[in-house]
Image (cartoon, rainbow, N blue to C red):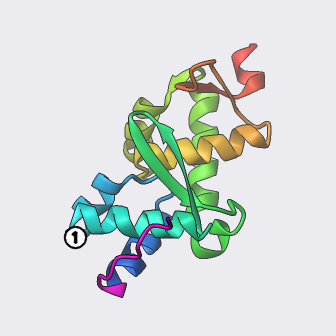
Amino acid sequence: MPRKKHQYETSVKELALNYVVQFPGSFPTEIAKDLNINKTNVMIALKDFEESNILKSIFANGHKNYFESDEKEILKYLPDAPENAQTAIVDYLSKHPNAHFVKMSEDLEKMFGIKINSPTLYWYLMLLENEGIVSSTDDTTRYSIPSASTE
């Protein structure tokens, strides 16, 4: 039997979707807290988007993290942040090989003024890894630039 669609404010769905578009890799508790809306409504909205193939999720670091289904599409919605963030990540990793991604998240704000939460940073790192720009350890918690890690 298909899941019954819940009736709740459309604005909650729009807010949740816009948050995931702006901060890929976000999880329901984080979204609800930052937007000051009910976590259950956020979870319902995200599940509806996932069932409609608008969003996808992965379970990582103890949370169900949400992303747009088409990773390339997200670049249309994010102004300059992806390029600046990716450049800052590569610059950081060139100076700090084998960096832990949680520490990297903290350091990027201090060093470059770029605030990226851990799930969003993880998403950027996955994109950079898919492009062969960075590499990760087996447990995907530490990252390096392949040429920097062999020096």
**Chain part drawn in magenta:** 1-10
Q: Residue at x 43, y 51 (%)?
A: 116
Q: Residue at x 59, y 75 (%)?
A: 77
134 to 20, vertically: above or below: above
Q: Total marks drawn? A: 1
Q: Residue at x 36, y 66 (%)?
A: 44
Question: In which quarter of the view is residue 80 placed?
Answer: bottom right
Which quarter of the rendered picture does the C terminus lie within?
A: top right
Residue found at the very far top of the displayed protein: 151
Q: Is residue 125 left or right of residue 130?
A: left
39 to 129, vertically: above or below: below
In the rendered structure, which amino acid carries the disc numbered 1?
Answer: Ile
Kindly report the secondary structure that dominates the magenta region of the rendered protein. Answer: loop
Q: Is residue 112 left or right of residue 150?
A: left
Instruction: Give SS at disc 1.
Output: loop
In the image, residue 123 lies in the stretch drawn in magenta: no
Seen from the viewer's position, the closer of residues 141 and 3 is: 3
Look at the image and tell me whether residue 94 can be seen.
yes
Residue found at the very far bottom of the displayed protein: 10
Question: In which quarter of the view is residue 98 placed?
Answer: top right
Residue 69's spot in the image, x, y percent?
64, 62
Which residue is denoted by mark 1 in the rendering?
37
